[in-house]
Amino acid sequence: MAAGCLVLAVGVTAEPARTIQSIQFRGNTRLDGAQLARLAGLKSGDADSPDAIGAARDRIVAAYRAQGSDVAVSIDIARPDATHTAVTFLIDEQGTSVTPRGARVGVPPIPPPATRQ
């Protein structure tokens, strides 16, 4: 090694992969848990992926809409330890419909500011 060189050893520890431990549905009466589980497409042991969980929510909303139902679906995520995630879909079958990714439907748009002449 050349004079004046400094060697620095850095240890990196990767976090353990987080997986879905449980999936629950609350507030549903029009579609049963088995139907919602199939629609969600998630299962215990899947990777904890915000994109996959969001897509599951979108599929649930689409199924309710296909039946003509007004629904709002939110997601509660609990992480009880370093490697597990519990996902609960909270379904409000009387709520204002929401589009994928949370944009509200049925709410009138905000009008543009008045133009001055």
Image (cartoon, rainbow, N blue to C red):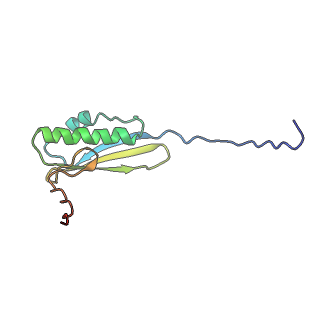
Where residue 17 appears, x then y in whole percent?
Answer: 50, 38
Name the residue at the left extreme: 68
Where residue 61 appears, x then y in whole percent?
Answer: 21, 42
From the viewer's side, name the closer residue of 113 and 67.
113
Residue under the image location 20 percent in, 35 percent down? 35
Name the residue at the right extreme: 3
**Relative side of 3 to 79, left or right:** right
Quadrant in which residue 20 is drawn: top left
From the viewer's side, name the closer residue of 90 and 33.
90
Please state, as top left, top right, bottom left or bottom right, where the N terminus lies in the image: top right
Residue under the image location 34 percent in, 41 percent down? 53
Q: In this view, does 103 lie above or below 31?
A: below
Where residue 55 appears, x then y in whole percent?
Answer: 30, 39
Q: How many labels were placed on the picture? A: 0
Quadrant in which residue 62 is drawn: top left
Name the residue at the bottom extreme: 116
Quadrant in which residue 65 is drawn: top left
**Relative side of 9 to 50, left or right:** right
Q: Can residue 103 be seen in this view?
A: yes
Where residue 89 appears, x then y in whole percent?
Answer: 27, 47
Q: Is residue 31 visible?
A: no
From the viewer's side, name the closer residue of 51 and 3.
3
Residue under the image location 9 percent in, 42 percent down? 68
**Relative side of 32 to 11, left or right:** left
Please state, as top left, top right, bottom left or bottom right, where the C terminus lies in the image: bottom left
